[in-house]
Amino acid sequence: MIGLKNRNKPISFDELLKELQGAKSNEGVQNHVNIEMLFHETFMSRYSSFKCFNEFLRKGNFDVKILEDIDNIPDELFDRHVDRETDFGSWKSMLDRANEEFLSVEG
């Protein structure tokens, strides 16, 4: 497809987190972050009206059983939900903030 990135292999949520954290070069280091750690109750309460990330997903009628399911949600749809239900304008900005806060506590 012309104009689209090569998506022969979909990127998993964990791989996305590693890329955003710059952890790709540290493959052997323990850098596995689960979604509950990243979007914990304090984070969700501070930036939304939800107590947990699963509640946020349910409100948008997103069927997420495993982290990879987030990859299957169309970006535009998820960005709209994030914009409407949180203090963020997009999923990327929400994910970036969660990463920043996680790294500042863990780092």
Image (cartoon, grey):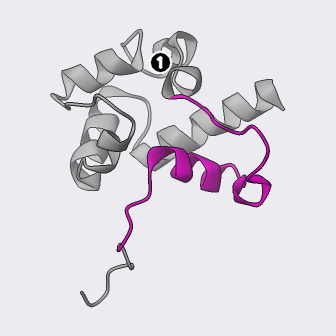
Residue 8 location in percent, x, y?
A: 35, 74
Q: Quadrant of the N terminus?
A: bottom left
Give the magenta-colored segment's residue range.
8-34
Is residue 38 depicted above or below 46 in this figure?
A: below
Q: Quadrant of residue 89?
A: top left
Furthest toward the right, the residue is 107
Q: Quadrant of the C terminus?
A: top right
As drawn, 33 above or below 90: above
Left or right of 26? Residue 86 is left
Coordinates of residue 94 in the picture (x, y in percent): 49, 38
At label 1, which amino acid type do we have? Met
Q: Which residue is mark 1?
A: 44
Query: Residue 83 is drawn in which quadrant?
Result: top left
Horizontal side, residue 2 vs residue 92: left or right: left
Question: Where does the image place residue 74, in percent across and percent down from the top left?
Answer: 23, 53
Q: Residue at x 28, y 43 (%)?
A: 78
Find out whether residue 39 is within the magenta segment.
no
Task: Report the front residue among 103 and 64.
Answer: 64
| Of the pair 27 and 20, the residue shown nearer to us | 27
